[in-house]
Amino acid sequence: MGSALKDAPGTAAGPANGPAAPPHPAPETRPSEAAAVRPRPARAALWALPPVLALGLLFLYPLALVVQESLAPGAYADVFGSEAFREALVTTVWLAVAATAGCLVLGFVLALVIAFVPFPGARAVARFIDVFLSFPSFLITLALLFLYGTVGMANGVWTDLTGAGSGPFRFLTTPWGVLLAEITYFTPFVMRPLLAAFSQMETAQLEVAASLGAGPGRIVRRVILPEALPALAAGGSLVLVMCLNEFGIVLFTGAKGVTTLPMLVYSKAILESDYAAACVVAVVNVAISVGLYGLYRGVSRRVGA
């Protein structure tokens, strides 16, 4: 009987042969500990207070002063009724739209060549695009002045070859010169998202299209362009906003006959000391910019940029 008890499973005499003891349950997080992990609303609000105060002091308060100054009696009626404001508004809009269209076309072609046409130095050119984005706008305008200005290289070569007293290149001080400078400067802002989108494309799609007899033009229209549309929309929206607020390019080209909204603000505030009119134009410019920026953010959110 003693041996039977020794060999019986589940008894104290034979725990090694019996079923394993159940593991200890993991300790549960106590409610007090969970509350300690989550940040308290009062503490979170305390940490958020300094940046909110800094934002209000450095940006919102000056903006409120501009809006308050623009509310002077008759300021909006005088500005909206002036021919200078209407011309500046039209010039600003058409320059921004035309520059954006030029950047989209030129940026798409250049990005297409860099991404899909093998040539030595393609990777270096792609990296230079990132460096170009850090250049100030007036630097590009200054370079164009050295090339196509009244005493620039192009006019110098023309006068040396023909013996003429002056060269034919005088377009930099016209709206076309401003348009050229803006397209030159802002095109990389379209190329950067395009190159990123092209790097995600599978080459198998291009190979299948080519094997089915599609030519380069058809491949670009049917395969590459649909994939590039989100990047084109995001880059074009960003360029449109930046062209709308561009000041340095117009100023450095010396185009006296080209008055945009930022230039009108400068003229009213600095040259004429009409601060109420300057603030009205500034408020209109900010309203248009915020609306276009909202469009840009909406497009970027939809395409996942």
Image: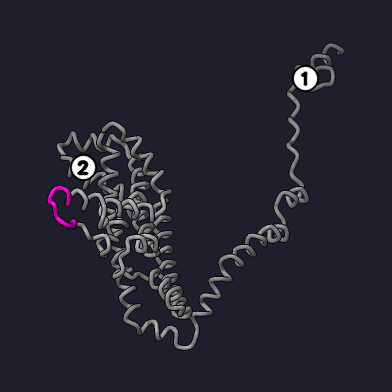
Q: Residue furthest right?
A: 2
Callout 2: helix, strand or loop?
A: helix
Residue 165, magenta (yes or no):
yes
In the figure, 217 relative to 247: above or below? Answer: above
Residue 262 tag number: none
The residues colored magenta run 158-168
Amino acid on which disc 2 is placed = Ile
Residue 247 seen anywhere in this rendered image of the structure = yes
Residue 262 relative to residue 83: left or right: right
Foreground tag (2 vs 1): 2
Q: Viewer-proximal residue, 24 or 103?
A: 103
Q: Quadrant of residue 223?
A: top left
Dot 1 corresponds to which residue?
9
| Visual colour scheme | one colour
Earlier along the polypeptide chain: callout 2 or callout 1? Answer: 1
Tag 2 residue: 219
Which is nearer the eye, 19 or 258? Answer: 258
Question: Where is residue 154 shown, x and y percent of the image?
Answer: 22, 50
**Quadrant of the rendering where the N terminus is positioned:** top right
The residue that appears at 38% across and 46% down in the rendered structure is 132
